[in-house]
Amino acid sequence: MSKQKESQYQTLLRGITKRFEELCPGCDYGFRYTLDTNSNPIFGYGAYRDGTIYMLDSVEAELRSVRLDTFSEIRCQLNFGCVSLEVITEKGDVELCRAEMSCMLSLQAIAKRVTLIKEGRRPDTAKDITEHTCSTCGKPYPRGSTVCVNCVDKKNLIKKVIPFLKPYTAPLIFAFLAFVAASGITVCLPLLNKDLIDNYIKNAEPKNVVFTSFIILIITIALVELALRLLGIFRAVTIAKVGNKIAVNIKNALFVKIQQLSIGGIGKRSAGELINRITEDSSLMQEFLTNTIPVLFQQTLNLIGIGIVVFVMDWKLALMVVFPMPLIAVLFYTMRSFMNRMYHRQWHAGSDSNTILHDIFQGIRVVKSFGMEKYEYERFDKSVKKLSDISAQNEVLWQKIMPPLNFFMGIGEYFIIAYAGAKIIEGTMGFGDMNAFLSYAGMLYGPLRWIAFLPRRLSRQMTSIAKVFEIIDEEPEIVDSEKAVDVKLSGDIEFENAYFSYNGYEYVLKDINLKIKKGDMIGIVGRSGVGKSTLTNLIMRLYDLNEGNLKFDGVDVRNIPQHTLRSQMGVVLQETFLFRGTIFNNIAYAEPNATPDEVIRAAKLANAHQFIMKLPDGYNTLVGERGQTLSGGERQRIAIARAVLRNPEILILDEATASLDTETEKLIQDSIAALTKNRTTIAIAHRLSTLRNATRLIVLEKNEIEEEGTHEELLKKNGRYSKLVLAQRQMSKLANKK
Amino acid sequence: MKDKSFNPLAKKEMVTKMSSNELIEKPTVNGSDSEENRSFTDLVKIQYFDKDNSKFYIGETGFVNLKAFMPPVQKDDLDENVSEEPVWQEIGRVYFHRAFPFELPEQFISVQEREGKEYGIIKDITNLDDESAANVRAALARKYYTPTITKIHSLKERFGYSYWSVDTDKGKMNFTLQDTFRSIAKVSDVRLVVTDIDGNRYYILDAEALDPSSYKKIELYL
């Protein structure tokens, strides 16, 4: 039903689009919109041609047009549950159209494209993502992914999986043979039992029994059972070994790829999402290769084998075995969705009470200091009771449902007994035949139960495989050019008409022209969000410029291998990250061969030696997760030591001393000043006193360089910088008064 | 136990808190007395807009503009314009943002400039003159697009997504939720806010007042 409705929307939209194209052919950058000015649903379509945006919708019969030169700016205004395209004209802001959120990406795209055209540049439309849903089937993409599971070429996916199996061809073939053999034996066992019963146990004339052959038959049955177990062990061991090796290969391939991707590529996904891909998605892929496929294979073999045997033995009886199967399949199918709903609720209740626990223990200081223990206890008690209620309900229901269900599953057996019993009484069938049939019937239901759950399992695994290969197939955005050659940097940096934007739509840096000479200390000032950190990210080439050039010693950054470039830089960020390990390891992170002497020197320079020596374990103190907790200032000093140990040509300090007290900061600055004599330093700071050693200051405002010069020059200029200095002085005066 | 009238308690609390703030707006004569009784939160001054100090009117291009009697708006925080003396001034186009979109849709509406800097707050739309109130309500309706679900025709869950087909006050709609359980926020025991995969919001004003077949479909997620 939903599909029908969707297609109805699509027909209407196509109608509008078609009329639009008749009225106004040859347009580019089409976009749709869905609401009128009073937020009532409509169908609208717009596009761009020759400096004009045209729009047509189901309410206004006329084609509307807006010339690009009538407005100064176009933007996509994000509202609450809807977006609108607005332009700023001389008379004021004008709304062009509005739409619900599904159109957000395409409206942002048109705003971006028109902005670029207005600035006289060419929009690069290939990279734009304009929809959250698959364009072919309208189904949403999985979270954090742009591969539609519904439409992805499944055969192609399987083809991609095969290379992971290739190194293990031999063991896999053995495992395969073991599967076939096991199936064969499974099918034969009831036949042997039949022989045992008919010819020996139920033999009408016991005197005729040859005792030795009776013993031989028993031994054969035992041996066959043993062979089956051995085959099972062999198969399980092979699959386990190969499966784990494959899992390691998949995980490594993913990890290597993720590290290769640029920060921009990684940043599209959250850390949790990436961890999920490496752990869960790759496990599901492994499960698919080593569990689903072999079991599917074996169950199919069993089904076919048993099917053939029972039909050869007695086709009427076979029909009786097969007859309840569709019924049971349907039963399993309905049970499945019912069970899912049942356990879904339980799972959510469980996860809710976990969340509460997590919340309380993480915030235990707050809970205790506000004296809210009782309130939290009540909250927890409520959620636990809810969980136990649901669990009890489910348990009771389960106990009520399962026994009758098992009875129904076994109902086929009564038919078999009735039919075969009658025949035995008649004397046309042996007791062993009936026994064999009963075991075959039982053996058929196992695969059936498994197959009933197969679609869900397969779709989960396919989704994961698609997500794994989405990453493995992704091209890194930042690549070393083929001409790239290793160079020794001297420290000259130059930005030429640089433009940069994270989303390709809102510029974070515009028209940046900046020459930094070897040995300069450049201070970057400006309010938060103005692009200061972005500027340093660009210098490290974590991102590539959208336009313009960035050169080191006159060499374009794209012609320097990323590793060479970054190995000659030292970076200290405001948020310092310490890896799990000792302080020594953390300082020597980028220079694993550093001697203790060098590490201590670096620590002294960063003013960290003193506090490290106060720790009982000195440089061997464990830090990071589950290690010794260090204060923000201490962590920052370790990070500074880490950066200076590398002896970099270019030192980047992004609010590197923000968590330090003024005294320590001054000490560190003095040592850094000595260090940076012949090195290029780029420092970002909110506290202006931090930048007093800077040879030049850059004031960023509205994503552009507003002022540039030395401290004195900027003070004389009486612009933004001098106002900032004044404001900070007033603040410190106030502080002193108190 | 279920508060169908949805959070009357929160409302009451809010009102009492507010009234103590009002003391600050219009200081009483014997200031020394109230000085001692002041709580921390009373120390904050809020620029409230009402019918005496503001006019919200529709500008030439269809957006709501503000003319207000308030201290001069500083375009730049570093300007040394320290005058606190209120004057009548044209602010231009303003943007509205509800502080409590679910609980108090008509109260505490922040009036902002384009980048989100706040000019002041409308404590209650009814404090404005009729014309301004109508204009603000229209602007809010345009910003907060939230169809109200009146009937659920079908709700199918497949592989972590749920596909909905519903009737709303804006007509028939289809949408998809990712992680259904988390996409349905419970504002009160019966009032729900549903957020779909694109970020559209839908209200269910009273889940229990829905027809039985609709209620049965969402019961699992409550």
Image: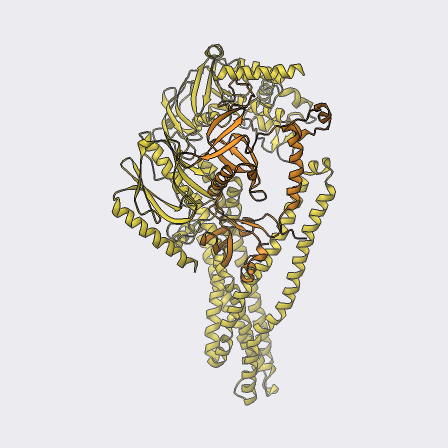
Farthest residue to the bottom: give it. Answer: A426
Does residue A582 show up?
A: yes
Q: Who's the residue at 42% across and 27% down the image?
A: A509
Count of residue discs? 0
Rendering coords of residue B32 (x, y %): 72, 23
Compared with A378, A216 (above or below) is: below
Q: Is A635 situated left or right of A325 in this image?
A: right
Q: Quadrant of residue A100?
A: top left
Q: Quadrant of the C terminus of chain B?
A: bottom right
Rendering coords of residue A135 (x, y %): 38, 49
Rendering coords of residue B185 (x, y %): 57, 48
Rendering coords of residue A505 (x, y %): 40, 34
Chain given the colour orange: B
Q: Who's the residue at 51% across and 43% down the image?
A: A273
Q: Nearer the viewer, residue B14 or B137?
A: B137
Does residue A430 show up?
A: no
Q: Is B58 situated left or right of A208 in this image?
A: left
Chain given the colour yellow: A
Q: Nearer the viewer, residue A504 or A575?
A: A504
Q: Nearer the viewer, residue A703 or B154?
A: B154
Q: How is the model colour-coded?
A: by chain
Q: Nearer the viewer, residue A410 or B153?
A: B153
